[in-house]
Amino acid sequence: MSKKSNYIADENRYEKMNYRRTGNSGLLLPELSLGLWHNFGGSDNFKNARNLLKCAFDNGITHFDLANNYGPPPGSAERNFGKILKKDFKNYRDELIISSKAGYGMWPGPYGDNGSKKFLMASLDQSLQRMELDYVDIFYHHRPDYNTPLEETMGALDLMVRQGKALYVGISNYQPKEAKRAFKILKDLGTPCLIHQPNYNLFDRWIENGLLDLLGDSGVGAICFSPLAQGMLTDKYINGLPKDSRAVKDSPFLNTEQVLEMLPKIKRLNEIAKNRNQTLAQMAISWILKDDRITSVLIGASKTEQILDSVKAIKNTSFSEEELALISDIS
Ligand SMILES: NC(=O)c1ccc[n+]([C@@H]2O[C@H](COP(=O)([O-])OP(=O)(O)OC[C@H]3O[C@@H](n4cnc5c(N)ncnc54)[C@H](OP(=O)(O)O)[C@@H]3O)[C@@H](O)[C@H]2O)c1
């Protein structure tokens, strides 16, 4: 059992971060947000998880991103987050933007996956119970479901807002064509889509083929996940494979073969970062933030030092034409 908290957030936290408007909405998000996909589950160190959240908030990171299935086991990140909120952030709920999602398999049977109204409504209720919250600030459909009418899925998001269980809604991992239809349906329902959450980093630039333009034109925000390609876009793998890294630990999402394949590119990008007086992690984040259609960069972290390193990215988000050309050559 950890001790009762006497956490008081750093009083200068809002001077340390920049905030950007989310599309055409009234909501400002920090340029860096923190995701709880890894390092907050039932099998992770609870004290470390607490410290990560406090460190982020002390540096002006007001947005924490979750999903029903984050753990492992699924649900445990939300449960741990609920405990930490109660202990440390009781007085700060109105200074936080908390998101959750549903769209991947969560419980057995035909109603525990995908995009039906039945699944999404029940999943949000379960997430609220686990986090001990009355509402989330943003609720996302986590991935497209081509077997459910988009009107039904978007209708569920609209209903959540009408029920007061979510303030805003978003979509994640949608391709431009479905995203455009989703925005239209939500707009017609009177619940405009706040934000899209796609994967975007120097090694995966797919959103440059239409999605970013669509988001800019539609007044929908963009929060990009895995900006460091799960840690590959840092200097951590340059001199070997650290035992406590995601690629070496038992992650189904990143393995050492992937890292070794990218290593030549990582080393070249690291040289460009050094010439900019940035760490590679900082440059990878700055490179995303250079585009003002991006609202926020959604980082993960296993150590507080990583958050402290990454937040410095906001200090230099401009790139010369030459730097951009060199980077594009490599990525
Ligand atoms: N919507 C979706 O489908 C979806 C999918 C994936 C993620 N997400 C969201 O995006 C969030 C971030 O994803 P991600 O964890 O893949 O992001 P990421 O920022 O690309 O990777 C984070 C990992 O990189 C390493 N790292 C971070 N900062 C570092 C630094 N400054 N120096 C060295 N290493 C550093 C740490 O790994 P080590 O363990 O190696 O230290 C950390 O856990 C998730 O938590 C989740 O909220 C959403």
Image (cartoon, grey):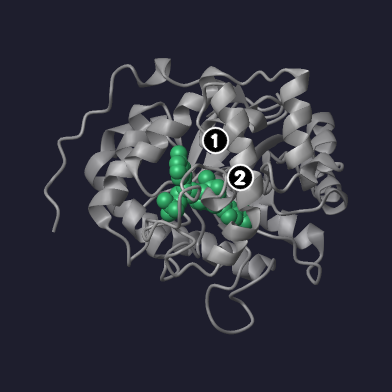
Badge 2 density bin: few <14, some 14–19, many ≥20, Cα 10 Å: many
Q: Tag 2: residue type?
A: Ile
Q: Identify the residue at image location x=40%, y=39%.
A: 306
Residue that carries the numbered disc 2 in the rendered image: 266
Q: Identify the residue at image location x=29%, y=18%.
A: 11
Measuring from the top left, give residue 73's x and y in whole percent.
41, 71
Give the CA distance from mark 1 to mark 2: 8 Å
Front-lying residue, 121 or 200? 200
Q: Does 27 appear above or below 93?
A: above
Mark closer to the observer (1, 2): 2
Residue 31 appears in view: yes
Front-lying residue, 186 or 81? 81
Q: Identify the residue at image location x=58%, y=62%.
A: 121
- Image quadrant in which the N terminus is located: bottom left
Residue that carries the numbered disc 1 in the rendered image: 280
Q: Does 66 appear above or below 298?
A: below
Q: Residue furthest bottom?
A: 109
Where disc 2 sits, the SS reads helix
Name the disc covering residue 118, or none.
Answer: none
Q: Tag 1: residue type?
A: Leu
Measuring from the top left, give residue 195's x and y in whole percent.
67, 40
* Left or right position of 80 against 135: left
Front-lying residue, 208 or 247? 247
Q: Are marks 1 and 2 in contact (CB under 8 Å)?
A: yes
The yes-or-no answer for disc 1 within 8 Å of ligand 1 is yes
Where disc 1 sits, the SS reads helix
Q: Quadrant of residue 112?
A: bottom right
* Left or right position of 261 against 42: right
